Amino acid sequence: MLTSHPLPASRAREQAHEIAQLLLRHQRRSDRSEQPGQCRELPCPDCRSTQSEVIEAFVRAGRPVRLVLPAFPGKSPNRAKVLGTLPDMAEELALGFLDSLTGRIRQIYPPGAEIVICSDGRVFSDAVRIPDDDITAYHRELRTMIAALPHRAVSLFTLDEVPEFAGLSHDDMRTVLTERHAVPLEQLRSRVQQGEELPLYRAITRFLFEDGNTPEYRGSRAALQRDARIRAYVVIQRSKAWGEFLAGQFPGSVRLSIHPQPCSAAKLGIHLGKSTGTWLTPWHGVAVDIGGRLVLMKRAEAEGLNCDLVERGGRPSHYVVREPVRSVHEDDTARRTALDATAVTVPDAPKEW
Ligand SMILES: [Zn+2]
């Protein structure tokens, strides 16, 4: 919808800049040790101008800024990491964060923003070994959570509702997507071997290894590692195919990613909360209330703490610790000023929201 009084160009540029600046505050960046020379400043002016240009086209037209986020695939199949197959407090927090982001954009620019979550679960469920029925149920519950968000600016888009794939089985949807939109696996392998996609490849391999390393797994670690490496290429191939498909489906949009991206790339890596550098996502962890503050951690880590499981609507939702928690990674000053000397210690750096 066009406004009857388009903004002067300078004002549009200013607002686009402000919106980009807001997004940059939540940028998920590469580990510097893995990709030296990325994003020399914080916030990064180069990444900001890339995004600002995309945003400005919406602002000039007086339309809500559309942000597309491939994410929320489905819960990890490893029950040592998550509470079950359905979204829980971990997802609800991330959705709340995205919703609040649209609210903050609206304060800068009244037409606001819309965030389209493009779940990639159906796209690679076979490679990550999540049953398709679990993906369907996960999407259904996600829609219920999204419908309850106050700003009504977040939506969910999945492979299932693409007219191009209507009537196909889930396997056929994936085959057609791959045929039409994917790069060949050999090409991907050679890119990774040249170091181009190495951090992403390592991260996906680690997730697949962890997801397969369930209490029931009886094979060797080496076999699991080999299997994870093979499947990582498929996951990356399909993710990229989905990304390409979405670029055609939602042209001109701000493209968000849960993975760090190179400096000035068209896609912007973003945290799903007030996080500070972690790969853990809601679908790979559980939410833990550590005294008024919610953090993400793996279920097994949470259960190592003195905490209670909270149920909502008859389903497990999150944990609440019985005593205040501090991180082993907090500095000495923080430790000295901690109010409770008997506070329990989180086994790993808490994944803050
Ligand atoms: Zn940058």
Image (tube, grey):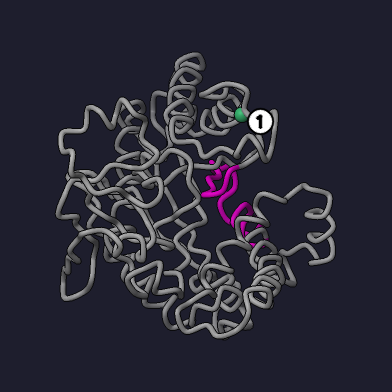
Task: Please give the range of residues in magenta.
Answer: 241-260
Tell me, yes or no, whether the highlighted magenta stretch contains residue 257.
yes
Residue 236, picture quadrant? bottom right
Tell me, yes or no, whether the highlighted magenta stretch contains residue 112.
no
| Residue drawn where x is 24% and y is 62% of the image | 318
The residue pinned by badge 1 equals: 38
Left or right of 176, for residue 26: left
Residue 83 lies, with reference to residue 26, above or below; the image says below
Ligand 1 within 8 angstroms of badge 1 C-beta: yes
Residue 204 lies, with reference to residue 292, above or below; the image says below
**Foreground residue, 162 or 1?**
162
Residue at disc 1, secondary structure? loop
Q: Quadrant of the N terminus?
A: top left
| Residue drawn where x is 56% and y is 48% of the image | 259
Residue 6 lies, with reference to residue 98, above or below; the image says above
Percent coordinates x, y for residue 179 in the rendering: 74, 72
| Residue drawn where x is 66% and y is 49% of the image | 199
